[in-house]
Image (cartoon, coloured by chain):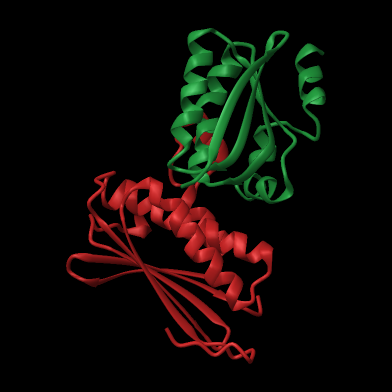
Chain colours: A red, B green
Amino acid sequence: MKSNLNSSNKIFEKELLVKSTTDNLAKIREFIKAAAAESGFSDEVVGKIILAVDEACTNIIKHAYKYSPEGNIFIKIKLENGKFTISITDEGTHFDPNRVPEPNLRQYYQQKRVGGLGMFLMKKLMDEVKYSAPSENKNQVVLIKYLSS
Amino acid sequence: MAEFNVNLRGVGPVSVIDVKGYLDAHTAPELENVFNKLLDQRQYKVVVNFDELKYISSAGLGVFMAYVETMRENQGDIKFSNMKENVYNIFDLLGFPILYEFFKEETEALQKFSS
């Protein structure tokens, strides 16, 4: 881990590897909370980042690994030039974000559908959300928040 | 480990669910169990008191969406009270205030059922 704490141009990288179980969500939130707070975000923004990462990891556990507890979730955080980047990588089923429609709450309510809200929240809470497949058996979602925002 | 507690109590004809701690994909099934129990007992008037809830993710919000229609079809409802601002903001982002009633105090939500 590189660290330079005495200026606003703080730089660091942190990593966390966890198995794909929902009881790890609390551990993931603690990890994100510490890193986001250290980066200088306000409590309100720290809360938004924590929730966005929780939603991303919940989606991986549910959809990529379909609740199988043996999958890996690899989280890498990087702060550089006021840009806070969280890259979350899994080795589960490939997921095409373009096939998930924006939710319409009234419609959801009528259809008793309860999924799909996580992606919508992630986009609302973060400055950028990008999906990619860095290799054949890996999926990655990158969440970005700028310190100035 | 995320700490979450759910407690069910009756206030007249209304069932009050107290939620405490962290409501996420890991703990949401505990809340679902309480709603299933209410359906078994044909209790459809529900107030959820959020006074001690610190955190909610969409997995928690989904529980309310899954049960509210059944409650309303049976002359009941799910009403919310005592929500902290950070928790309310998440409900607000997803447009819940259009479809659900929020009250500052539990007593106001209870009164709404008797009016």
Percent of width and height locating residue B85 = 73, 49
Q: Nearer the viewer, residue A111 or B50?
A: B50
Q: Quadrant of the N terminus of chain A?
A: bottom left
Residue A94 image offset from top left, x and y in percent: 24, 58
Image quarter for residue A48?
A: bottom right
Q: Is residue A113 left or right of B38 when viewed as pictured?
A: left
**Residue depicted at x 47% and y 30%:** B30
Picture residue at 48% right of the left edge, 64% below the top: A31
Residue A69's x, y, as percent? 26, 47
Q: Is residue A100 visible?
A: no
- Is residue A88 visible from the viewing direction of this image? yes
Asked if residue B41 lies left or right of residue A61, the reply is right
Q: Residue at x 66, y 46 (%)?
A: B87
User: In the rendered view, would you say B47 is above or below B114?
Assistant: below
Q: Is residue A33 left or right of residue B54?
A: left
Figure check: A95 above or below B17: below
Asked if A15 appears above or below B78 in the picture, the reply is: below
With B13 as the anchor, is B59 left or right in this view?
A: left
Give x and y (percent) for residue B110. Answer: 77, 19
Q: Quadrant of residue B9?
A: top right
Quarter of the image for the C terminus of chain A: give it.
bottom right
How many discs appear?
0
Nearest the viewer among B102 and A101 is: B102
- Residues B15 and A26: in front is A26
